[in-house]
């Protein structure tokens, strides 16, 4: 979800997902700070409750649950949470009953907003979705992860669609996720516009093509099942937006 400075226009990665709020007002709630009204694809007016996270700190799953309850009690159709950071446990919380919960990540530029020029092009709020993956069995009781793209929720229609791997710049796996911090153990690079050439240009050096082939993949190498019972997958798109999701593995 992108926002124009000083405006009331929000969109996701694709321009057709744009939401234009007809009104955006304050709301005197314990968690909900704003109320926005917009029209869906059928022209029906819908309302969104806006939850704003702390300037310094992270939003927890408990925060999102309480905000969603307050949002539902107020009769809003969707919760939009805006925060600089989210705890890992909150990544799996995307709805409370029928109420969708959209987690927008705020760009750190907002800390310096008074000092930034108002160009109208700032990507200050981004809703990205979650990875769409398959966990595959591999020889010797190992597993592989295959990434199919990113599932993106379109709040104007209430539908979820899957974007192709071409929208992904890079993706990472923490194959021994401990529930607290993400550690990159596997890294892969996809994308359009010949990323191999771009990487060579950026590094100003030649790269071993065999090594690059192993990194330029939508399927990981086989790895041992995690002793923690969980893996985490992080995806970054071409706009620099990132999303992470935790998966249980037995």
Image: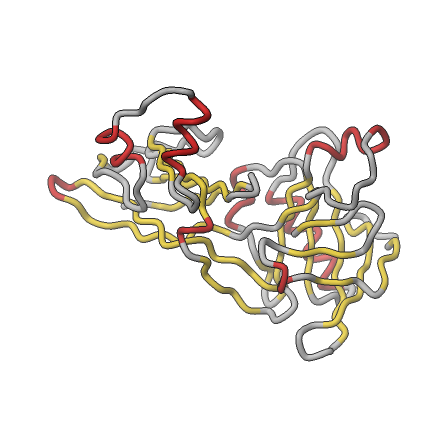
Label total for image: 0
Q: Residue at x 60, y 68 (%)?
A: 98
Along the line of sight, which residue is nearer the eye, 69 or 130?
A: 130
Residue 211 percent across, percent down from the top left: 25, 29
Say if 101 sits above or below 113 in the image: below
Quarter where residue 110 is shown: top right
Residue 214 percent across, percent down from the top left: 25, 35
Q: Is residue 188 left or right of residue 167?
A: left
Coloring scheme of the render? secondary structure
Q: Is residue 248 left or right of residue 130?
A: left
Q: Residue at x 58, y 53 (%)?
A: 13
Say if 169 sits above or below 187 in the image: below
Residue 31 percent across, percent down from the top left: 77, 48
Q: Is residue 159 left or right of residue 3?
A: left
Residue 21 percent across, percent down from the top left: 79, 62
Quarter where residue 46 is shown: bottom right
Along the line of sight, which residue is nearer the eye, 11 or 193?
A: 193
Q: Is residue 89 left or right of residue 125?
A: left
In the image, farthest residue toward the left: 140
Say if 218 sits above or below 211 in the image: below
Q: Residue at x 72, y 40 (%)?
A: 53
Q: Residue at x 25, y 44 (%)?
A: 144
């Amino acid at each position: 979800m992108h926002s124009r400075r000083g405006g009331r226009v929000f969109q996701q990665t694709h321009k057709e997902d744009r939401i234009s709020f007809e009104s955006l007002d304050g709301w005197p709630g314990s968690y909900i700070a704003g109320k926005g009204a917009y029209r869906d694809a059928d022209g029906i007016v819908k309302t969104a409750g806006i939850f704003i996270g702390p300037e310094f700190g992270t939003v927890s799953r408990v925060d999102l649950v309480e905000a969603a309850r307050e949002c539902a009690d107020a009769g809003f159709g969707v919760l939009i949470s805006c925060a600089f950071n989210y705890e890992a446990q909150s990544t799996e919380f995307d709805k409370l009953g029928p109420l969708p919960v959209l987690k927008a990540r705020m760009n750190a530029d907002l800390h310096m907003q008074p000092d930034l020029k108002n160009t109208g092009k700032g990507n200050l709020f981004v809703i990205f979705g979650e990875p769409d993956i398959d966990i595959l069995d591999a020889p010797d009781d190992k597993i592989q992860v295959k990434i199919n793209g990113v599932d993106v929720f379109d709040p104007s229609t209430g539908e979820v669609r899957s974007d192709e791997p071409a929208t992904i710049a890079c993706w990472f796996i923490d194959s021994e996720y401990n529930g607290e911090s993400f550690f990159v153990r596997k890294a892969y690079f996809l994308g359009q516009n010949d990323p191999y050439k771009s990487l060579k240009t950026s590094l100003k050096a030649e790269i071993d093509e065999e090594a690059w082939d192993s990194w330029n993949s939508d399927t990981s190498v086989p790895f041992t099942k995690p002793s923690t019972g969980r893996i985490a997958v992080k995806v970054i798109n071409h706009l620099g937006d990132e999303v992470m999701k935790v998966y249980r593995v037995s």
